[in-house]
Every structure is written in C-alpha cells, then in structure tokens.
Image: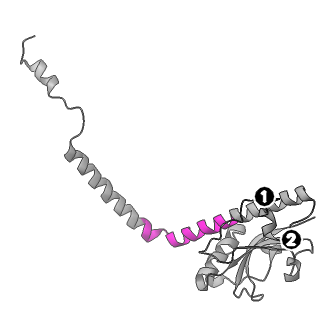
Amino acid sequence: MIQGSNMTRGRKGMRKGISLVEMLIAIILFGTISMISFKYAANFYDTKLASKKALVASLVEQGAQLSNAYDIYTMQFGVAPTDENNLTQANVRILTSIPTTITEIGVTGWNLNTAIDATGDASATDIAFEFAVTNTGSDAEEYCAILNNSVSGSVDLNTTLFPIAAYNSATIGKAFCYGTGGVTGTPPYAMVFVKTIN
C-alpha cells in the first residue's frame, strides 16, 4: 500500500474519546437538568413532611428494638424489666444503650410505662414504651398525625383535624400518639408503643 493514500489517512483520522469541550458541555447540560428537576421537586413534593415521616419511621424502629429487648429480658430473667435502663445494665447487656433520642421530636427520650392501664382502655398487664413529643405547636401535632396515619390510614395528616382521644388504642392500634393533657388531644403529646403482656 502506498503511504499517504486515502485508506491509511482514514484510519489515522478516527478519534478514541471525547474532547474536553464535549465533556464540559455534557456537565453543563446535566447540571441544568438537575436544577430544573430540583425546582420541580421543591415546588410539588413536600420535603418537610417527607423528612418528618422519616424521623417518625426511625422512632417506630426504635420502639420495635425496645419491645424486642423487653421480650428477651423477660425470657432470660423470668421477670419483666421495671425500667428501660434495665435493658442496658452490665449484667444484662441486651442493648448496648437506649436508642438515641431523636431531638427533632423530643428531648427527654424513652420511658417504660408499666402502669398504662390508669390512662384508659389497656388491661392491667399492658406496658408501653413512650416517647414524649417535646417539640411544640404545629410540629408536635404533625409528628403525632404522621404516627397515627402510619398505623391507621383513616387518620388524616391534616393537623387541623388532629384531636385524638387520650389513649385510644382500641380504635387506633398498638402504636399511636395522643395528647396527655386531656381527652381532646391537647398537648403535651406522647408517642406510645403498647405491649400486651399475658
């Protein structure tokens, strides 16, 4: 083959990648599309409510951990724990620590209530892990409405329809939030995870 002919020139002219300019154009296009989709999501997706739902889901997971630890303690020692801190004692070590307080919802943390029958419709053998909602105003109501809605879809997320009867596990379920200030759902609020003990 003769050097410099069309056949050899064609092969040498082929590129093996993209240029820096083409890459910059692609980055700018992806950035523009991302900004447009972010603005769309911010306008039409309630990100504040979604973050609150995630926090409540974390709280429900913590309640499940405490409930399981309660069962293990009862099986291991033959008696029920009287306090949530019994689950972390050095001779027990079922939990390494009480689940971290979700400060966006409350600052006092978890409490084991062994006398919840005094509040209403529970039997004398029921216990509950409670998390006090120390956040105030509409945020507290919204956290309560989210938990109650996740347990019973018939409970509206609209906090203007919030009033929740005190300790109404018969109609809401074994996990719910209620107003401890009275039967009309007045603050302060508590998220309750009930265990029926036989």
Q: What amino acid type is highlighted by mark number 2?
A: Thr
Q: Is residue 77 left or right of residue 66?
A: right
Depth order, front residue of 112/96: 96
Q: Which residue is mark 1?
A: 93
Whether residue 174 appears in this view of the structure is: no
Residue 96: percent from the left, percent from the top? 72, 59
Q: CA distance from mark 1 to mark 2?
A: 15 Å
Residue 103: percent from the left, percent from the top? 61, 74
Number of marks present in the image shown: 2
Q: Which residue is mark 2?
A: 82
- Which residue is rendered at x = 84% and y = 57% of the image? 72
Q: Is residue 2 left or right of residue 182?
A: left
- Most frequent secondary structure within the magenta stretch: helix
- Which residue is rendered at x = 52% and y = 72% of the image? 48
* Circle 2 residues within 10 Å: few <14, some 14–19, many ≥20: few
Depth order, front residue of 86/5: 86
| Image position of 56 with respect to 141: above or below | above
Element type at mark 1: loop
The region drawn magenta spans 41-60
Q: What amino acid type is highlighted by mark number 1?
A: Arg
Q: Is residue 168 left or right of residue 32?
A: right
Q: Quadrant of residue 155?
A: bottom right
Q: Is residue 70 magenta?
A: no
| Image position of 68 with respect to 10: above or below | below
Q: Quadrant of residue 117?
A: bottom right
| Image position of 154 with respect to 4: above or below | below
Whether residue 69 appears in this view of the structure is: yes
* Circle 1 residues within 10 Å: few <14, some 14–19, many ≥20: few
Mark 1 / mark 2, whichever is N-terminal: 2
Element type at mark 2: loop
Q: Quadrant of residue 41?
A: bottom left
The nearer-to-camera label among 1 and 2 is 1
